[in-house]
Image (spheres, rainbow, N blue to C red):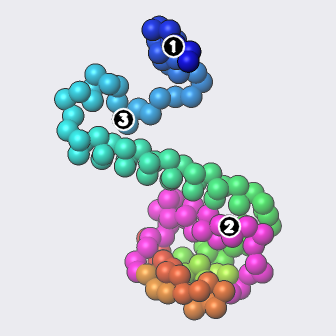
């Protein structure tokens, strides 16, 4: 059995600290965590996980939009028209007018962009009516 040199953990820590991957800042340094309760640490980890998930969703949404610029432009025009009229709508309503997108997340990306720009807001939820959607819950949107 090989013995591990006593200084090896310091070398590993130096490699991790000098790597290009940023250390999660929301978890804090070990000295900051010493006075924290277990609940504080759990909350920090949960917040960090939510941030990672949101970043991944944003990245996927952007990638799906660039998959078909013509489709995204047409979807955006329909969305803007619904916002201007002021009616409640879902992604399903917009997809009923368009041909299917190449990416399943493309419609969500278009709607999310409008919501982040403050042009629309979620006001309700309802089950999808398309058989293909298998009754998943859809957000109902209206002009902000």
Vertical arrangement, residue 31 with respect to residue 118, above or below: above
Q: Which residues are magenta?
A: 96-124
Vertical arrangement, residue 135 with respect to residue 11, above or below: below
- x then y, percent, for residue 86: 49, 82
Q: Which residue is mark 3?
A: 27
At horizontal 58% and vertical 21% (from top left) the residue drawn is 19
* Between discs 3 and 1, the one toward the N terminus: 1
Q: CA distance from mark 2 to mark 3?
A: 33 Å
At horizontal 34% and vertical 30% (from top left) the residue drawn is 28
Between 34 and 72, the one lying in front of the other is: 34
At horizontal 52% and vertical 17% (from top left) the residue drawn is 12
Secondary structure beneath label 3: helix
Q: Report the side of 30 relative to 59 (left or right).
A: left
Secondary structure beneath label 2: helix
Location of the N terminus (image quadrant): top right
Q: CA distance from mark 1 to mark 2?
A: 51 Å
Q: Report the side of 143 relative to 2 (left or right).
A: left
Q: Residue furthest front?
A: 1
**Residue 122 lies in the magenta-colored region:** yes
Q: Report the side of 10 relative to 28 (left or right).
A: right
Q: Which residue is mark 2?
A: 106
Depth check, mark 2 against mark 3: the one in front is 3
Between 94 and 131, the one lying in front of the other is: 131
Between 11 and 50, the one lying in front of the other is: 11
- x then y, percent, for residue 42: 30, 46
């Amino acid at each position: 059995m090989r013995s591990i040199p006593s200084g090896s953990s310091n070398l590993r820590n130096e490699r991790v600290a000098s790597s290009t991957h940023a250390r999660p800042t929301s978890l804090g340094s070990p000295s900051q965590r010493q006075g924290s309760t277990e609940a504080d640490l759990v909350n920090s980890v949960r917040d960090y996980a939510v941030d990672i998930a949101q970043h991944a969703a944003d990245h996927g949404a952007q990638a799906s939009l660039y998959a078909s610029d013509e489709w995204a432009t047409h979807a955006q025009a329909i969305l803007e028209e619904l916002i201007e009229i002021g009616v409640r709508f879902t992604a399903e309503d917009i997809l009923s007018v368009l041909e299917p997108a190449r990416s399943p997340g493309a419609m969500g990306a278009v709607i999310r962009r409008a919501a982040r720009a403050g042009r629309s807001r979620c006001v309700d939820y309802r089950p999808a009516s398309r058989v293909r959607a298998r009754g998943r819950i859809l957000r109902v949107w209206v002009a902000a």
